[in-house]
Image (tube, grey):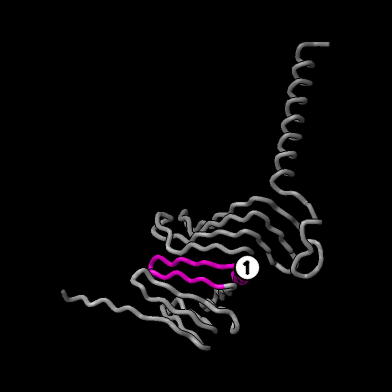
Amino acid sequence: MSSNHRNDKLIFSLRCCSVVILAALLMIACSFDYSAGQGTDGGRPDITMENIEYARVRGGDLLARFHAEHAERWEERQIMGLREFYFEQLEDQGETVNVEGIAGAAEVHLESGDIVLFYGVRLTIESEDVIIRAPGIEWNDSEKIVTGSENDIVEVQRSDGTSFTGRGFSADIRRRTWSFSGEASGSFVEEDEQE
């Protein structure tokens, strides 16, 4: 056997080994474990992933990133289910975190951008100095509106001591307003700007 023929076999073997290693790494990062959950429609997800990180970039600027311990995606319905979900929305070319949140689970509607967060939600909105805690929250991306269930008690706090709890929470991000349609209680703190 000639030296060139042995080198060709060695190169071919190394390439095959690289492909096998790459395939193994992809299977670890992206497992098709259908027993993990039955999904939002009772069927099997198209893909199941563990310990995922996602970044959304526009024009070279980092807009948002999220992490989830477990994710399932249904291509036909364009829905992704996430467990142990953490996210950040960034500003200033990705330098400043404006909104961060956690939830036990989330359902992301991929076409509309709408998101339902549930199983204990905490949102921190730095630009508004607001922390929102709720059992569940829905984000309507086209309207830029956050709503809580009519029956869930939602808590809104600010660092100045303002604190409200109530039912039927809604926040309009464009107008920078929030309200409760049901019963609510709390205190509003207004600082005197004069000494």
Q: Is residue 74 left or right of residue 108?
A: right
In x, y percent, where is residue 87? 53, 60
Residue 110 seen anywhere in this rendered image of the structure: no
94 is higher (above) or lower (below) than 13 = below
Q: Main secondary structure of the magenta part?
A: strand
- Helix, strand or loop at disc 1? strand
In x, y percent, where is residue 128? 38, 71
Instruction: Please identify the quarter of the rendering in which residue 148 is found.
Output: bottom right
Write down the residue under mark 1. 119
In x, y percent, where is residue 100? 48, 62
Give whichever of 13, 126 is nearer the camera. 126
Which residue occupies 46% across, 64% down? 99
Please tell me whether residue 9 belongs to the stretch shown in magenta.
Answer: no
Instruction: Please identify the quarter of the rendering in which residue 16 is found.
Output: top right
Which residue occupies 69% across, 66% down? 79
Which residue occupies 77% across, 60% down? 37
Three-letter amino acid code of the residue under disc 1: Tyr
Q: Which residues are drawn in magenta? A: 109-134
Residue 93 seen anywhere in this rendered image of the structure: yes
Give whichever of 185, 181 is nearer the camera. 185
Q: Is residue 55 left or right of residue 24?
A: left
Q: Residue furthest bottom?
A: 182
